[in-house]
Image (cartoon, helix red, strand yellow):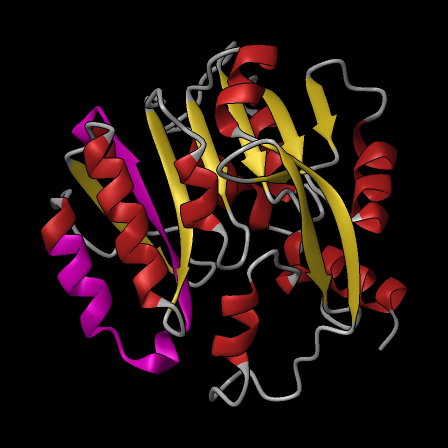
């Protein structure tokens, strides 16, 4: 499959009819009109589009050149969207992005992520066959330039802990993706968020927009839950908030 075909597949997947109201209903707990959301690892921009439908401004961060061009096509006429073509990491500089041309959804700046996927059930046939050296910014730098976000979504394929290492001021709420092939990354993220002052967490599995816990849990309980997930669960997103009521199912 070519990169163009893979991006077309992502567009069909993430812009499927009926999905937008589900996304908007879920993210409305985190963003309101006039708020600011960061979409880190924006991919084809479906979360950015949701933030805008809710009336929030958006910073869409996507390092892959082909996807950055797509975001420009989608949002160049929208003054409420700022596009940033960079990686997000622990400190400003440069890093190598490893690209899976047949599946750009899983591009990563983490060699450990690629190693963890090698031979893992459910990851058969995934090949990272291209590399690009790209600029790295930080969440703190993005907040300094564009404003303090009310919500940050992080989906960067095993680089989540590095991204959070560049954050020193806790947004009201945020999310990070985790995978069952790299549970240690999720635990590092939870430790970082606890150090930033978060005490309330919930999670969604896969692309589901429904919390797995009826009420928020603490970082230790979340870590135990992630550790107990079957490998087949594959991935999900952990949500943290300084306002626990936002994490009730």
Residue 50 vertical position relative to residue 98 in the rendered view, above or below: above
Q: Position of residue 201 (x, y in %)?
A: 21, 42
Which quadrant of the rendered structure holds the C terminus?
top left
Q: Is residue 240 rendered magenta in the image?
A: yes
Q: Residue at x 48, y 41 (%)?
A: 163
Q: Is residue 25 left or right of residue 92?
A: left
Which residue shows up at 66% across the image and 80% down it? Answer: 126
Q: Residue furthest front?
A: 93
Q: Nearer the viewer, residue 31 or 172?
A: 172
Res. 249 visible in picture: no
Q: Position of residue 122 (x, y in %)?
A: 51, 85
Q: Is residue 249 magenta?
A: no
Task: Answer whether residue 233 is visible to the viewer in this image.
Answer: yes
On-image quarter of the N terminus: bottom right
Find residue 57 and report its horizontal and vertical position in percent. 59, 17
Corner quadrant of residue 185:
bottom left
What is the quadrant of residue 197 in the picture? Answer: top left
Front one among 119 and 115? 115
The picture quadrant where one finds residue 125 is: bottom right
Which residues lie in the magenta part? Answer: 221-244
């Amino acid at each position: 499959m070519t990169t163009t075909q893979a991006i077309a597949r992502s567009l069909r997947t993430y812009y499927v009819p009926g999905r937008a109201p589900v996304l908007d209903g879920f993210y409305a707990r985190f963003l309101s009109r006039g708020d600011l959301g960061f979409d880190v690892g924006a991919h084809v921009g479906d979360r950015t589009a949701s933030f805008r439908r809710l009336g929030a401004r958006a910073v869409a961060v996507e390092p892959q050149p082909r996807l950055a061009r797509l975001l420009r096509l989608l949002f160049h006429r929208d003054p409420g969207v700022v596009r940033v073509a960079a990686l997000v990491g622990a400190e400003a500089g440069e890093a190598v992005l490893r690209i899976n041309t047949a599946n750009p959804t899983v591009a990563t700046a983490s060699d450990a992520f690629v190693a963890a996927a090698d031979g893992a059930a459910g990851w058969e046939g995934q090949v990272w066959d291209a590399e690009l050296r790209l600029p790295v910014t930080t969440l703190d730098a993005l907040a300094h330039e564009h404003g303090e976000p009310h919500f940050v979504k992080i989906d960067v394929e095993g680089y989540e802990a590095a991204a959070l290492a560049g954050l020193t001021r806790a947004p009201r709420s945020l999310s990070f993706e985790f995978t069952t092939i790299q549970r240690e990354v999720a635990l590092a993220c939870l430790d970082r968020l606890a150090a930033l002052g978060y005490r309330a967490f919930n999670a969604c599995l896969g692309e589901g927009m429904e919390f797995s816990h009826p009420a928020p849990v603490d970082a230790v309980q979340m870590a135990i839950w992630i550790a107990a997930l079957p490998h087949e669960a594959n991935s999900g997103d952990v949500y943290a908030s300084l306002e626990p009521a936002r994490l009730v199912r």
